[in-house]
Structures are given as C-alpha cells and as structure tokens.
Image: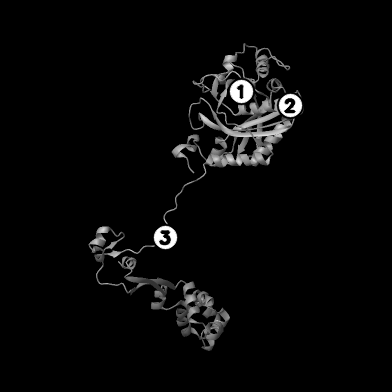
Amino acid sequence: MAKRLETLYYVVNHVRSFNTYQLTEEGKEYLREGSPEHVTLKHLYPHVEGSANSLVDETRDYLNIVEAYGYDEDTLVSQLKKGIMTLPHDKQDEKVSDLIKELKKRKLMEMKKFSYLYIVRTSHFTKEIKKQITDLTYLLIKNEEYKKYDVKKYNFFSSGKKMNKGNTHLLIKQMRTFKDVFVSLGFEEMDTHNYVESSFWCFDALYIPQQHPSRDLQDTFFIETPEFCIDDFTEKGYIDNVKRVHSVGDYGSFGWNYRWELKSTKKNVLRTHTTASSCRALFQLAKEYRKTGSIIPKKYFSIDRVFRNENLDSTHLAEFHQVEGLIIDKNLGLSHLIGTLAAFYKYIGILKLRFKPTFNPYTEPSMEVYGYHEESKKWLEVGNSGIFRPEMLRAMGFPPEVSVIAWGLSLERPTMIKYNIRNIRDLFGYRSVL
C-alpha cells in the first residue's frame, strides 16, 4: 500500500535502518552461569593458601581460558598467592567498541540490522484514493469526468525499449573479414556477376570433359529458357584450342580422347563454381599478353554465390558461397602455393595446416587443405587447391613458363566454426541468429 501511495504522489517513503547487538546462545549461557574467567577466579580464591604447583594442577582446564584473556601461569599464580587479582594494563582502558569486537570474536554477541519505513505526507495527500487514468479522451474532457480521476503524470524523459534492428548478417561479417585478408595480401577482386554461365566457361575451358559426372543433371542446374548461349560467346580460335585439347590432346597432353560437341558446351547452367569467373579473368590477361608480349603478375580473389543440385542436410546447401583466390606469374610451383595458403589461413585464425593429395580435372598437382580445430580437437577440410593445368592455360594463349596457383573454400563452413553453428540451414531465413 505504501508503495502504491508513493506512485500516486500522496506520500514519500524513506527506508531507515539501525544496528543492535544481541547475545548468542553461548553468550546467554555465560550471562546465567558466568564466564570462564569468572568461574576460574571463583574456583581459585578459596585455594590461594596452597602451593603454586598444586594451584596450577587443580586449575589446568581453566588456565588455558584465562591465558587467552591476557595472563600467563606465573603472573596468575603470583597474584593469587598475594590475594591480588587485577586486569593486565592493556585490558584496563578498553573501549566499548573493543569489548564488542572481542565478544563478537568469541561468538558471544552478534549484530542484527533492523529496517523500517518512515512515511511522510506530501501536499497531494488526500483521505480518498482516486482511480488513476493514463489517457485523456474527448468524452472525459467534454463531460468533465476527468475531475473524478487522477491523471498520471507524463515522463517526457523516459525511452522505449531499444529496437534490435539493422544487424549485419554473420555471412556478411565473415565475407568482410575474408575481403580484408585478401586486400592486405595484395589481391584484387574479380568481377563475378554472372550467375548464369555457359557450359564452356563453367566446364570446357577448365578442361573438364563433357562426360564428367559433375555435368550431369543430378549435380548441375541447367537453364530451360534460354537453354543455349549466343553463338559468339567467345573467340573461335580459343574454342578450337579447347576442342583440340579435349579431343586429341596438345601441349604435351593426350587429352580426354572423345568426340567434343559444340552444342553441349553452349548449354546454360547456374554456375557450379566461381572458377568460371577466374577463367574469364585469365583469358583477358592472355589476350593482353598476345598484344603486348609481356606477363604482368596478378593476384585475384572472389567471394560469390554458386549453385549445386545437392540434397539439403545439416552440412549441404543447393546455394552457397565460394571463396577463391589465384596468383598468376612465371614459374610458380607447389612451394609458392603452400606458402601462400599458410599466410592466408594464418590471417583467418587457422595456424595448423595439413595438405593431402587429391584429383581435380583442371589442376595438377592438387591438394586438399585441412586445418586443426582447437575446440573439437579434429582436423577439418578447409579448402581445395592446386596449380592450373597447361591444357587450360596454353589453350588461352599463355606461354609454357606461366603458372597459376589457386585455391578455394566455402564461406559457410568457417562461419559455422567461428560462431558454433551446427546446422548450415540456421545461417539463413528466420532461424538465422544476428
């Protein structure tokens, strides 16, 4: 009731408190029967005529208590023989606070805190409590019924609950982190705006044969309309080089030895990897080389969406992001690739790396990259890498001494590891935690 009256501005409540001291059960027993000191003295005085040794022996149990209060055996016995019993000098001038401290130390006294409410009337105090309203309506004012109520005061300095809005998605945060890493290492971002690619750029230009399983319906989304790309989608000489290296081989390779079809390479697909954009960027550098005769070392990266005809589960999506990096220069080898990977993964917090040989149609040698996850104590696959094959680069027009090292990883898996997300589907839609 007092709190309610205060909210109505009828009263002001003051909480006051004070401390008091009470005897414990042991203290009450000492009050009734006497303290150990008192009992000791009471026992000793009738026997002061005896020998000192006998006094000590008879009062052994009591002396231990009295000694704790400031006496030693010799002083106590000496004073008893003389019939004198006084307090030690350091005990004679004790203050009340010191005595309380001593009693609390011996657990003979305890402090109790008591609080009470001191209520003061205000100028708004009345004997009758009116109903409080928060809104003034037209009818209340017109009929003057507002006079029957107390209108709650407005607090113009209060603020509503802060809206949780405008947060950055976890994937965007991780994407920005990767971009900062690439830029700090001297990479340029590639143009990756083509979600729909021709099979030529997505597969054939990468030296992936037309009968490869990744080009089947169960792995790739093919476009119905338009089903095929335009005829002049790239230079005819480049198409002829790709056809030759696939069909009969060239540049020291035996090729795949099959009948290469132009119709198959013109089929439109949702790109299965951003390496198609890497291939486009490299082809532009090859055209510049044919004009100028010089190779300019370049570092490229991209982070964008790719599409796979996958069954959805806790670790797979049909649409996800691929992070890709490549370096083009003369005479690059496996040591350059491993060193670059070590620098890249160090920036994103993965210090322990392992490399496992693998097969990719368009890189040789190829390596899977494994990083040690400290929390799970496991080695996890964190990327794929390799050196682009001569069948791919020479067909574009690059000289034999030019090499390209490249690697890629998904954006979602590192994000799941960093934010401890077990189901990849929780990164999207209403289940996403921002």
Assess whether mark 2 and mark 3 are in contact (beta carbons under 8 angstroms).
Answer: no
Q: Residue 165 or 211: which is nearer the viewer?
A: 165
Assess whether mark 2 and mark 1 are in contact (beta carbons under 8 angstroms).
Answer: no
On screen, residue 98 above or below 139: below
Q: Amino acid at mark 3?
A: Ser
Residue 361 appears in view: no
Identify residue for label 2: 289
Would you identify the image quadrant in which residue 362 lies? top right
Expressed as whole percent of the image width and height from the top left, the position of residue 315 reads 51, 32
Residue at 75%, 29% (x, y): give it. Answer: 295
**Element at label 1:** helix
Expressed as whole percent of the image width and height from the top left, the position of residue 174 reads 57, 40
Q: Which label's residue is closer to the chain start, 3 or 2?
A: 3
Q: Residue 185 or 334: which is nearer the viewer?
A: 185
Expressed as whole percent of the image width and height from the top left, the position of residue 278 reads 64, 28
Q: CA–CA distance between discs 1 and 2?
A: 20 Å
**Element at label 3:** loop
Identify residue for label 3: 158
Q: Residue 67 or 113: which is nearer the viewer?
A: 113
